[in-house]
Image: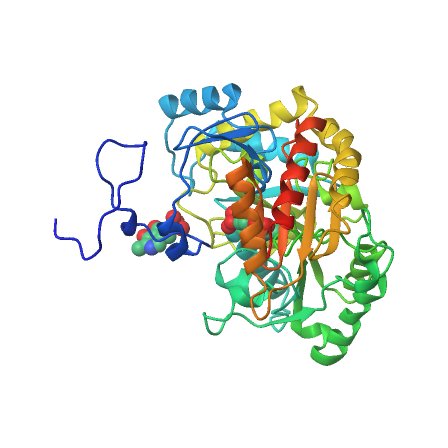
Amino acid sequence: MNLPFKSKKIPNIHTKVVDLDAYWMPFTSNRLFKKEPRIITQAQGRYYTDSDGRKIFDGLSGLWTCGAGHCRREISEAVSQQIRTLDYSPSFNFSHPKVIELASRITELSPNDLNRVFFTNSGSESADTAIKIARAYWRQQGLSSKTKIIGRSKGYHGVNYGGISAGGIGANRALFGDGIDTDHLPHTLLPKNNFSHGLPENGKHLADNLLEMIALHDASNIAAVIVEPMAGSAGVIPPPKGYLQRLKHICDQHNILLIFDEVITAFGRIGSYFAAEEFGVVPDIITIAKQITNGTQPLGGVIVKEQIYQCFMKNAGPEHRIELPHGYTYSGHPVACAAALATLDILENDALLECSRNLAPIFEKALHSLKGLPYVTDIRNYGLAGGITIASAPGEPTLRPYQIAMSCWKKGFYVRNGGDTIQLGLPFTTTKDEVDLLINAIADSIRELT
Ligand code: PXG
Ligand code: PLP
């Protein structure tokens, strides 16, 4: 084949030459990666192996996905059994046992009357599905002007058009033109809260910005507020004390649905099954993905309260009509559902939520020991999630975090750089020694910055 690019041999993974240039990588500086590829060939427990045979500690549990550790036998057996029994089943008009069982299991764990689950394949699809459900809910009741979605600055709701419109990370929106109709609450990252441990004291009042938005747009034009109960991708921003309660109160008063995007927070990351439970605020809709299959299969979901589901059942007309004209070819895929059921068993049998809770104070103490290092302007944490803000190099806010993450990789530690932050999401069974080694590697990498 006459390739326009020079083929590059990737060492040690194949004997044949593979064309690295063929691959357009997601959320990656492709040009830099292709100069110096980082290839992961295996994973076990809390460690990856790279193509040079090095062991690397997984400091973000994949992409917030693999808290129960990699290559869990129970999951691979469930997946293998399922793919040999029922590899695919159409989910429109027909169903299969695993998806029904999974919906029941999830609603046993979910708070209050959030007891109906719609399945997707990712967090992005979950966010867009939740937004569509919210808009359709009001329209079904004759309130068709309630369409606007209120997100929050620094929010991340995936990469589909609903999600980037409601999302508040400028770089993820800048290139893509018009989205859906949205407005944004201010983020809660206040300088006063710098270096807070756990939930910050200041910022409850920021929820009152929703009142200004209601004054501006009128509640008759607003369908829903969507927020991450604890922002993840923007660098781990736990909610100020009382903030989510206030947001919920205002939403209720003005007939606006509240959506919690729990794609990162659900299933153990912050020590509970749901942030709604952890923070004591129950929204109308919760989105999930990631940890639900321990990252092994793509699966997401939207959990809605009974009243929302019933509204669709009541208003759709004759019984043969489809109540929600929405769904994916792979909604509730049997193999993904088998992986999710095995994951829920592991979380329970290995008491992993308890592990996550017990490790959190140890992690908190070690993480905050980085305070005082050059360029470290803020540190935040909750549960097994942590964020470190790094002072920007002139005009290049993402450069230093990238350098830190790459230096950690060379030292045998995977951490995530995002914007001007470094993010950590430890596997639930991480030991104290591993926490210390990881934090030392980050400290050394920060000291190496010029
Ligand atoms: N909502 C939230 C709150 C998320 O964190 C999504 C939606 C989108 O999910 P999918 O499955 O479509 O990627 C996410 C995903 C990071 C990082 O570095 C975070 C995500 C994805 C990749 C990296 O923090 N979150
Ligand atoms: N594009 C085309 C042409 C399709 O036929 C389909 C599904 O049937 C889709 C997109 C959507 O794919 P999915 O259901 O996997 O999201």
x and y, in percent, of residue 288 in the image: 60, 44
Q: Is residue 389 left or right of residue 170?
A: right
x and y, in percent, of residue 246 in the image: 83, 60
Front one among 375 and 1: 375
Q: How many marks?
A: 0
x and y, in percent, of residue 151 in the image: 65, 64
Q: Is residue 86 left or right of residue 157?
A: left
Q: Is residue 118 left or right of residue 28?
A: right
Q: Quadrant of the C terminus?
A: bottom right
Q: Is residue 394 visible?
A: yes
x and y, in percent, of residue 142 in the image: 62, 68
Q: Is residue 72 above or below residue 448?
A: above
Q: Quadrant of residue 135?
A: bottom right
Q: Is residue 287 visible?
A: no
Q: Residue at x 40, y 55 (%)?
A: 32
Q: Is residue 399 above or below residue 80?
A: below
Report the coloring of the rendering: rainbow
In the current view of this chain or complex, which residue is farthest to the left? 1
Front one among 360 and 435: 435
Q: Quadrant of residue 431?
A: top right
Q: Residue at x 39, y 51 (%)?
A: 25
